[in-house]
Image (cartoon, helix red, strand yellow):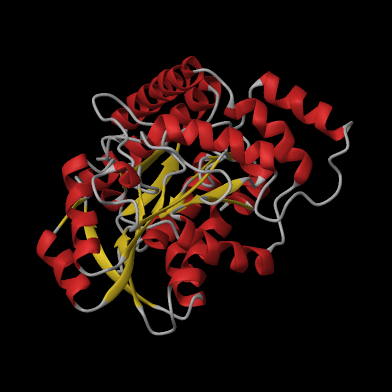
Amino acid sequence: MTRLAQEQGAINLSQGFPDFDPPKALVEAAHEALNGPYHQYAVTWGAQNFRESLARKLTKSLGFEVDPKSELVVTCGSTEAMLASLLSLINPNDRVIVFSPFYENYGADTILAGAIPVYVELEPPSYEFDRNALRAAFAEGAKAIILCNPSNPCGKVFSREELLFIVDLAREHDAYVITDEVYEHIVYEPRSHVYAASLPFARDHVVMCSSLSKTYSITGWRLGYVMASSRVIGAVRKVHDFLTVGAAAPLQQAAVTALEFPQSYYDELRVSYARKRDVFLSYLETTGLSYSVPEGAYYVMLNVSPLGFKTDTECAHFMTKELKVAPVPGSSFFARNEQRYVRLHFAKREETLHEAGKRLQGLASRTLVRSAHR
């Protein structure tokens, strides 16, 4: 969809990356790092000062001491973090639970690890899960569950009570909860982010994957990490070494600056994205179509079924070519054949969102025409 958006000159609300720059201090730190002696390999599992700064940040967030020497691996984005974790913990033909809708990589990662994905539905529009279905999936012998919180694509933020239920099931079945928490700082009131690893007795069962991409608007830097107990990290380090050797040394050096930002940075980030969400949703409201109000992350699932397209892909192409706004067909995120949704994102400057919103109002006229012909 990004390629199609470029071909059509459309506003790209498909692939989730910003059209604004990272914090100025971070960019300046990158320039400085490129002038310094950081052009060769860093330590395979991450430069020491990067891991130390990351450990300090995580310690504040998680409420327990994170050891930079034995509990962290720096990876090439959270994409590698997830795959390295699965390859470290899962044997061929093991079962891995994946909530659906899901970020596309999870199904592929599970298959690449030789495992069998077992999908448990998050039912729109509230994206709740059936607890009996999840319990049954664990009872069938699942060795892990992948949990994206806040969720891409649906914006669900799992409550503390839901996370306790999931972690307790994992403990009961001696399984792992492998989390993807890249949107940890983009959560909207009244919701708050609860780290699964911070829950009682969760430490040995939770493997946390995350990255700096979304928090600091540096998706192209590909700096991610795995945080877990030393026993798990020992295995992940071995796999990581053979996958990528290591993340970019000068970028790790520069990112130390971001990891030392004060709490005010994260407070302002949350306020900024809440404002973008409100601007964008105000335009979606005028289309007459239903949508999910994201509790976290920066994605909206829009129900386009009233528009009368045969498939969500046909609708996405229409929106890109005719309205000049590119979404992602929602079917890419579901295990079942689901054609009702497209996903849009609002990690854009407000002027971009206003322009995209005006273009999306063209959906309202199509909805009216469809209703008149019934």
Relative to the observer, which residue lies in front, 41 or 186? 41
Q: Does 63 sit left or right of 69 as displayed?
A: left
Relative to 97, residue 273 above or below? above
Q: Taking 135 as reference, is 319 left or right?
A: right
Q: In which image quadrant can residue 99 be found?
A: bottom left
**Residue 22 in sight in this render:** no
Residue positioned 42% across, 54% down in the render? 315
Residue 222 x %, y %? 65, 47
Q: In this rendering, would 94 be left or right of 245?
A: left
106, 6: nearer the viewer? 106
Q: Is residue 280 visible?
A: yes
The picture places residue 161, in percent across and down from the top left corner, at: 16, 43
Q: Residue at x 72, y 61 (%)?
A: 245
Nearest to the observer: residue 121 or residue 304: 121
Q: Position of residue 150 (x, y in %)?
A: 35, 42
Residue 187, quarter of the rendered image: top left
